């Protein structure tokens, strides 16, 4: 196709549309400002010339009128024609005087601001030099949790982000960043995907396929793990070359359903194996439980010392190594460790008297809520679904933050309430309302922001799971191809390197006074679960600790 040249017109001196788009912002503003100022002077000169003839009775030339306007606008003079007799002329000249301030205080900052912003803003990296690292393409769902997991393991990583604000926040944390389009092959080339050990794609679902294809255009063989909100695009991602597609919301919903099923099925256990004959368990105490009202010392004594209470959740906070005289109640969740047989026996005894055909109310029928409902379909539980929008599987249509809606769902006679609402503030409101309407209710809540976990516990939640934290744990396991001790738990269980503590006993290290609790030590392929304060570290061991994400994160600091 042959393009025709457009003949130059009266504005032919101005840049073409394509050239204009390539100009820097301050240059475009400068050109627009010059054109506007020239137009203002020309128009003002015409108006002033007319006023001189019509109201002042003078007939000087137009060029003289323009000179007067320029003198006034620039502040170099106050008008060689002064004084003026007509009120109209004086008013117009006053407006010209004020226009000087318009030029100085509005137009000049308008032009110079982009220049100053570019000069003062930091230079954002668009490429890195790295190898054998993990490339994290976006942080849409896991909210920097994977970064925390990789940092705690000492794994090099680079994060690709598109916006400047997120890049600056990560740079303040000393995180390696590449700024660029997540769907661009050039961006992934600059992040050294060709030398990476793995790539994590955590973008919007609709962009994940494009991002994956861009990665494959740079390196065909690199391991890729894709995080998605739903499984709608799973087949497309597999065709595009994803090694693994993960949906944290499905995993979270499955974990909640497993926990409820465990409480109503005596043959099942929710414990986590720590070795051949050792296990760990998070145990929720309910009102009719045999251990409700007992002290920590009595609970341990009833197992002949085979089970130790490592910590407990109570009144919205976690307490490690609780006082033996601490009394548990129906707001307590215990963290236990001990022999597998004793753990399971205590778990079975605690849930004695629990309704084996309970009513479970699921508030919110999104990905998490619908997964919980499907997970309970084969159990003896009766599931009542509440959602703001009608649907085939929704039993009660209404706002779960309102008393009438929860009462219509049977909150007073229900056994468990699962709060699977996306909005954390609304989830807290539902928990608070449910606790007032049915204090014996077991309330399980999903959270999107870790900072809200204490709030929702104070509002009445018995069990809280953080979606970003769980996403980070599962992703780290998938990327590093590690076996996870647990992922769907309120507390985090990790292995840390013992080399900083070589030659010292447990009581001589900061681990003894830290919030994370040492539950086992791995030495020469064997897991030692009976770790006393006098246990001396050689330096080659792996230490298994459990605690909140914040507490474990403080160990690496």
Image (cartoon, rainbow, N blue to C red):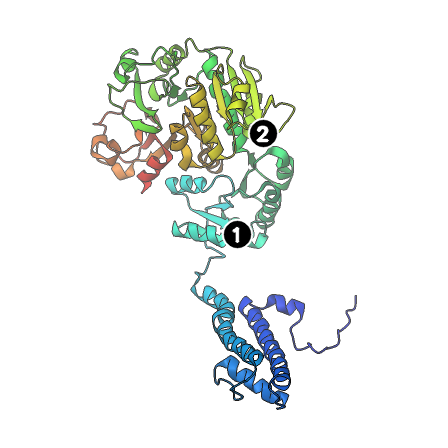
Image: 363 above or below 93: above
- Whole-percent x, y for residue 120 in the image: 43, 64
Query: Which of the two discs, 2 and 1, sits closer to the camera?
Result: 2
Where is mark 2, residue-wise?
388
Image: 60 above or below 14: below
- Whole-percent x, y for residue 385 in the image: 57, 22
* Secondary-structure class at tag 1: loop
Image: 359 above or below 315: above
Question: What residue do we see at 38% from left, 10% from top?
Answer: 349
Outermost residue toward the right? Answer: 1
Image: 470 above or below 212: above
Q: Please name whichever residue, 505 or 164, is drawn nearer the observer in this view of the structure.
A: 164
**Quarter-wise, where is residue 151 in the image?**
top left
Q: Please name whichever residue, 357 or 489, is drawn nearer the observer in this view of the structure.
A: 357
Within 10 Å of disc 2 (Cα), the crowding (few <14, some 14-19, many 20+) is some
Quadrant where the image shows the C terminus: top left
Image mark for residue 31? none
Q: Is residue 256 left or right of residue 394?
A: left
Outermost residue toward the bottom? Answer: 60
Within 10 Å of disc 1 (Cα), the crowding (few <14, some 14-19, many 20+) is some
- Whole-percent x, y for residue 22 in the image: 60, 67
Q: Is residue 329 left or right of residue 181?
A: left
Quadrant where the image shows the N terminus: bottom right
Where is mark 1, residue-wise?
162
Separation of marks 2 and 1 at Cα, in angstroms:
34 Å
Q: Is residue 521 visible?
A: no
Q: Earlier in the sequence, mark 2 or mark 1?
A: 1
């Amino acid at each position: 196709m042959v393009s025709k040249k457009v003949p130059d017109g009266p504005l032919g001196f101005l840049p073409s549309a394509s050239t204009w788009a390539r100009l820097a912002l301050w240059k475009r503003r400068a050109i627009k400002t010059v054109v506007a100022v020239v137009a203002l002077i020309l128009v003002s000169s015409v108006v002033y010339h007319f006023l001189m003839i019509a109201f002042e009775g003078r007939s000087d030339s137009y060029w003289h009128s323009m000179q007067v306007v320029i003198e006034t606008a620039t502040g170099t003079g106050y008008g060689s024609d002064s004084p003026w007799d007509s009120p109209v002329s004086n008013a117009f000249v006053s407006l010209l005087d004020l226009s000087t301030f318009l030029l100085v205080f509005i137009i000049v900052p308008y032009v110079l601001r982009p220049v100053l912003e570019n000069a003062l803003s930091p230079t954002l990296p668009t490429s890195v030099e790295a190898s054998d690292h993990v490339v994290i393409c976006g942080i849409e769902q896991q909210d920097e949790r994977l970064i925390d997991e990789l940092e705690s393991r000492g794994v090099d990583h680079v994060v690709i982000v598109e916006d400047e604000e997120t890049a600056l926040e990560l740079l303040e944390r000393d995180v390696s960043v590449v700024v660029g389009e997540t769907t661009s092959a050039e961006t992934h080339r600059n992040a050294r995907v060709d030398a990476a050990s793995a790539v994590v794609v955590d973008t919007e679902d609709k962009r994940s396929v494009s991002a994956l294809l861009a990665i494959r255009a740079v390196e065909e063989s690199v391991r890729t793990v894709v995080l998605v909100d739903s499984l709608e695009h799973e087949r497309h991602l597999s065709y595009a070359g994803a090694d693994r597609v993960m949906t944290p919301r499905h995993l979270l919903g499955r974990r909640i359903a497993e926990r409820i099923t465990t409480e109503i099925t005596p043959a099942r256990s929710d414990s986590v194996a720590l070795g051949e004959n050792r296990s760990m368990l998070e145990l929720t105490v309910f009102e009719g439980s045999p251990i409700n009202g007992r002290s920590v010392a009595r609970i341990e004594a009833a197992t002949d010392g085979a089970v130790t209470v490592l910590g407990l959740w109570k009144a919205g906070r976690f307490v490690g190594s609780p006082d033996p005289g601490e009394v548990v109640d129906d707001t307590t969740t215990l963290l236990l460790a001990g022999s597998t047989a004793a753990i399971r026996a205590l778990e079975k005894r605690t849930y004695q008297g629990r309704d084996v055909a309970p009513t479970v109310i699921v508030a919110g029928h999104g990905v998490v809520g619908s997964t919980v409902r499907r997970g309970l379909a084969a159990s003896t539980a009766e599931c009542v679904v509440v959602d703001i929008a009608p649907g085939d599987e929704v039993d009660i249509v209404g706002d779960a933050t309102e008393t009438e809606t929860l009462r219509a769902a049977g909150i007073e006679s229900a056994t468990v309430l699962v709060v699977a609402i996306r909005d954390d503030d609304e989830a807290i409101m539902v928990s608070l309302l449910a606790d007032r309407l049915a204090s014996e209710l077991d309330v399980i809540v999903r959270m999107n922001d870790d900072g809200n976990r204490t709030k929702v516990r104070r509002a009445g939640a018995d069990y809280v799971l953080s979606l970003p934290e769980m996403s980070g744990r599962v992703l780290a396991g998938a990327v590093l191809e590690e076996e996870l001790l647990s992922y769907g738990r309120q507390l985090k269980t990790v292995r840390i390197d013992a080399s900083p503590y070589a030659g010292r006993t447990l009581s001589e290290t900061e681990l003894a006074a830290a919030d994370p609790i040492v539950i086992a030590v791995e030495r020469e392929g064997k897991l030692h679960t009976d770790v006393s304060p006098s246990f001396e570290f050689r330096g080659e061991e792996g230490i298994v600790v459990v605690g909140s994400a914040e507490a474990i994160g403080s160990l690496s600091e």
